[in-house]
Image: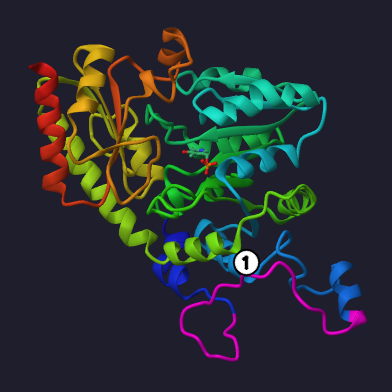
Amino acid sequence: MSEQKENFETKAIRTQTERSQHHEHAVPLYLTSSFVFDDAEHARALFADEVSGNIYTRYSNPNNNEFIEKLCLLEGAEDGIATASGMAAMFCSMAALLKSGDHVLASRSVFGSTHQILNALFPRFGIEHTYADIDDTASWESKIKPNTKMIFVETPSNPALDLLDLQWLGDLAKKHNLILNVDNCFATPYLQNPIKWGAHIVTHSATKYIDGQGRVIAGAIVGKKELIKEIRFFARHTGPSLSPFNGWILSKSLETLAVRMDRHCQNALQLATFLETQSLVVKVKYPFLPSHPQHTLAKKQMRLGGGIVTFEIAGGIDNGRKFLNALKMISHSANLGDTRSIATHPASTTHSKLSDAERLAVGISPGLIRISVGLETIEDIIEDVKQAIIATGA
Ligand SMILES: *Cc1c(COP(=O)(O)O)cnc(C)c1O
């Protein structure tokens, strides 16, 4: 994976919007809804797409452009757009490229709101889907239909941390002439570049590790120029644009993505290694633990194992709740990718509306706990988890 990783930090730090007449060092905030034209001819040429430039912040803005230009460099993408949320990115990346009568082959292990788009919203517009299971990749090809247009996946999956082989998916998409759309939120461009393996579109919830400090809701879509052109048209006229304030935050955050991810991954591996020694913990899942069933694949397509660790606490749902209530430092919240460690019990919260069977199909057992491992001192993270585990056995 070396070539796109080259000078990752320099690209993330030194890609910058042109300086203003004030010679500022850090990029200023361009809080403006519109931009002025040089003259009538300039206005005409901008609207006719004959020259590039900013017209109106719903279309583009220097802060959002800088954020997206960096993300394209980091993902190895030709072009991209920033969106107001991760879900706006997921929705636009599909809705802009699909029409009534089309079919999507989707991994069953996708984000909850992505399920709602596929299950509840797209059928209204005549767009259908079939789910395929991560642990049954042999069946995926047979689920491709003559009207299939797109494959939509997440890897690693949330919260089960199962992986899909991106090279295999890239080949499958190519063979059947399908658009491969990968939600790369969990891995971030620092750990994994789906485009390298044949993805045409990479989507992000920038709310998570790209912000990294739990401040803003944002998303991004990057990929092939001709596809982004369609998505840009869709977004320009439907309006899911990112606030330039948030674009400014995110561009700054990308400057520290590499160092933050290095530490998230180091802390996560240490926590996972500790959990494997605990008798009240039944199963620990982390892509870079040798015990992960897809450890070899993780090493092939990911630089490091990511910041999320899941484990199964003995005693099911009741002990899962006890564990969360016993935590002293680690936050109980639904977000992830923050500097602060966050614990979630999917069976009683994010995935509580599913049946037991539906939960098990996506790897969520009753006692499963997900920890988004933050950047606190690792000894303090481990100490808090340890005392909460002991509390469940009392
Ligand atoms: C959070 C998340 C989303 C949704 O992003 P928002 O920014 O909350 O809209 C989509 N996909 C994954 C994998 C996520 O974790």
Residue at the image position 47 percent from the left and 44 percent from the top: 185
User: Is 197 included in the stretch rendered in magenta?
Assistant: no
Q: Nearer the viewer, residue 296 or 201?
A: 201
Residue 288: quadrant of the picture = top left
Which residue is rendered at x = 74% and y = 71% of the image?
54
Could you say where residue 291 lies in the image, as x and y percent from the top left? 23, 29
Residue appearing at x 72%, y 26% in the figure: 122
Q: Quadrant of residue 286?
A: top left
47 vs 319, left or right, is: right
Q: Is residue 250 left or right of residue 66?
A: left
Viewer-side residue, 232 vs 72: 232
Relative horizontal placement of residue 240, taking residue 376 as reference (left or right): right
Q: Position of residue 321 (x, y in %)?
A: 26, 20
Would you say residue 146 is visible in this rendering? Answer: no
Magenta residue span: 18-41
40 shown above or below 324: below
Q: Is residue 37 magenta?
A: yes
Q: Which quadrant: the N terminus? A: bottom left
Horizontally, residue 337 falls left or right of residue 285, namely right
* Circle 1 residues within 10 Å: few <14, some 14–19, many ≥20: many
Instruction: Pinpoint residue 146: horizontal percent, then vertical percent.
Output: 77, 23
Q: How many marks?
A: 1
Residue bearing the label numbered 1: 65
In this rendering, is residue 340 above or below 312?
below
Q: What secondary structure characterizes most of the magenta part?
A: loop
- Residue name at image x 52 percent, y 49 percent: 217
Can I make out residue 230 in this image? yes
Q: Amino acid at mark 1?
A: Asn
Looking at the rendered structure, the secondary structure element under dot 1 is: helix
